[in-house]
Amino acid sequence: QVQLVESGGGLVQAGGSLRLSCAASGLTFSSFDMGWFRRAPGKEREHVGAISWSGGSTYYADSVKGRFTISRDNAKNTVYLQMNSLKPEDTAVYYCAARGRGNDVYAYWGQGTQVTVSS
């Protein structure tokens, strides 16, 4: 049974930082690309970024480029999202997701963690 469990969300002031973690189990973690998504109230889900199975390739949405960094530790089956210079518009529920190598669809999703940025 695949499980993705996010942690690290919370309330932070604008300009602050948070580090989200996503611990994976039940899958061969090193065979999966990992993505971070977010959904703000009343908005569509946004693909924030992704990291390849090896960690050698990353993608970031323009809205977070230069502020957010995705990394992974395959020995710990964990992917991270370091968020710096946070803005109120970054307020959302953040989800991690897993996509098998060569697949287009993220098949597995976490339950999400709330990030709230106060102005």
Image (cartoon, grey):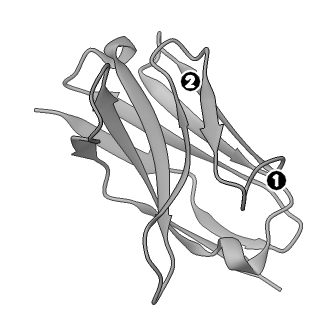
Mark closest to the chain's N terminus, 1 or 2: 2
Query: Who is closer to the viewer here, 57 or 96?
Result: 57
Residue at the image position 32 percent from the left and 19 percent from the top: 101
Does dot 2 land on a helix, a strand or a loop? strand
Q: Which residue is mark 1?
A: 84
Residue at the image position 39 percent from the left and 60 percent from the top: 112
Quadrant of image for the C terminus? bottom right
Q: Is residue 77 left or right of residue 46?
A: left
Judge whether 90 appears above or below 82 on screen.
below
Judge whether 82 appears above or below 86 on screen.
above
Q: Which residue is mark 2?
A: 72
Does dot 1 land on a helix, a strand or a loop? loop
- Mark 1 belongs to which amino acid? Asn
Based on the displayed image, in which of its 4 quarters is residue 90 positioned?
A: bottom right
Residue at the image position 81 percent from the left and 51 percent from the top: 67
**Furthest residue toward bottom:** 42
Residue 104 spot, x, y in % from top left: 30, 36
